[in-house]
Image: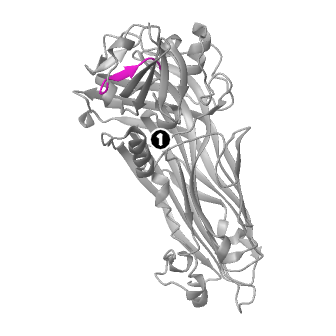
Amino acid sequence: MKTRTLLTVLLTAAAFGLVGCGPDELSAAEAQARYGMAPQPDSSVTLQPDVVLIGGGPTAIRAMDPAAMTFTMDGDADGVDELAPGKVMFASAVAVGRVVRTEKADGDVVVTVAPVDLTDVVRDGRIAADEPLSFDQATVADAGTVPGGHLFRDMNSSVEATPAPTPASGTTSPHMRYVPNARAAGLLGSAEYGPTLPGDWTYSVVNEGNRLGFRATLDQRETKIISEFHVTYAEPRFRADISIRDGAIEVARNPKVLVEGIRSVGVKLDGGSGRGLAGNVGYRVDLPIQLVSRQLLVYGIPMTLKVGFKLYLETAFSARNSTLNAEGEWSLDGAIGGDTAPVLGTLQSITNSIGGASLGINGVVWGAAMTVKLGFGLLALQAGPYGKLILTIGITRGSDLGIVLCRSATLTVTAISGAGLEANEAVKGALGKLFGQALKPWEPRNLTRHTIIDKTRNTPPLAICGG
């Protein structure tokens, strides 16, 4: 397999920081570490005719600004004078995109680019890799800020009207009316952004032993939610084999993307509200922290193998000075992207763990997605093959004043494999506004999608609790 791994040290956070990269002339090694490798000629791959290769690759890049979607290029570098709206600039694994406009600046050229899909760059060829996921050596990278990557919803006007998840019995207790929909459809998009999250968020990476994930804390409106998502793993591996012909993925050749070695998935929540209904919030947050495993040349195409995370949250507190906590862990047997769904087993029941204190009924919907992707483009908007694991939970705890203390949890776990560029409608809209024009529509191609579990459990199993 013609996949070559960069033999130098893995990307460092300083070297691959995408925010605030000012005008700079770097050595070849420094430029490659910051911006990725340059594309290399390969007879087995044909690029699209509008792709313009930039001489010098990453050394021709003087600066980048993900928030503005711009690269400042050396005006004397080969190919820069060919860049015009509609062309696709390809300088490195990071510096690739469809040109929206160019502007000269003191001998350099500032190029504004739109994200590109896999088939916008490759006309004919193969994207294939079989690589270990070196989580123990992976480096935290700043994905940079892209427009439209942060969604906030004020829940004050809609909490009481938010539908509850349907219990397995098909009945819904009126005592559970404040629970939002636990299936969290907002997790199916993608858009990473900046080092500072709006809304009083803090976050950190979990990369301890064989555990990988994130911790995130929201402290806003006297509502505080501390959460953790993690997977455990053993000999994790990323495999992909996708053929492209005439600018389209050849479905007949049975394209495959597999993420192997994930052994379990877990979540911890600990929250509370001093304001009750008035403090409820809703967020979709694509964490700017990403773990870069390695740089690769795949048939001459420079790509980055990385892991990214997404977080979704809706609170539904009905009483002041309420607390709510829960913890669950589930085993996972099977690969993401396989022909059959991985098998889920309960290691720690989240329903049995639900605790807290309140004079009212309270609920939280919380979801996380972990995506392993081999791609090119800004880390925030990469195109390429990917495997994704999505977990959402909706938990409810009844009032301490009730005759019976009801607890309910809905768990949904989905595994998806696919190829292409992922961006939700908010990001597309923000980019279109930034560019002053509508973007070419793109949708990632899902190769496999398995709902591993979608189940609600109420305890105690009484009619008053929806059981």
153 or 68: nearer the viewer:
68
Q: Residue at x 37, y 9 (%)?
A: 41
In the picture as drawn, the residue positioned furthest to the bottom comes out as 403
Q: Position of residue 412 (x, y in %)?
A: 52, 61
Q: Position of residue 94 (x, y in %)?
A: 49, 25
Quarter occupied by the C terminus: bottom right
Mark 1 residue element: strand
Magenta residue span? 85-92
Q: Is residue 69 above or below residue 88?
A: below
Q: Residue at x 48, y 24 (%)?
A: 71
Quarter occupied by the N terminus: top left
145 or 296: nearer the viewer:
145
Count of labels shown?
A: 1
* Residue type for callout 1: Gly
Q: Position of residue 116 (x, y in %)?
A: 37, 32
Query: In this figure, which residue is indicated by the disc labeled 1?
Result: 387
137 or 359: nearer the viewer:
359
State whether residue 309 appears in this view: yes
Label 1 crowd (10 A; few <14 / some 14-19 / many >=20): many
Q: Residue at x 61, y 53 (%)?
A: 331
Q: Is residue 90 magenta?
A: yes
Q: How is the image coloured?
A: one colour
Q: Is residue 89 magenta?
A: yes
State whether residue 317 appears in this view: no
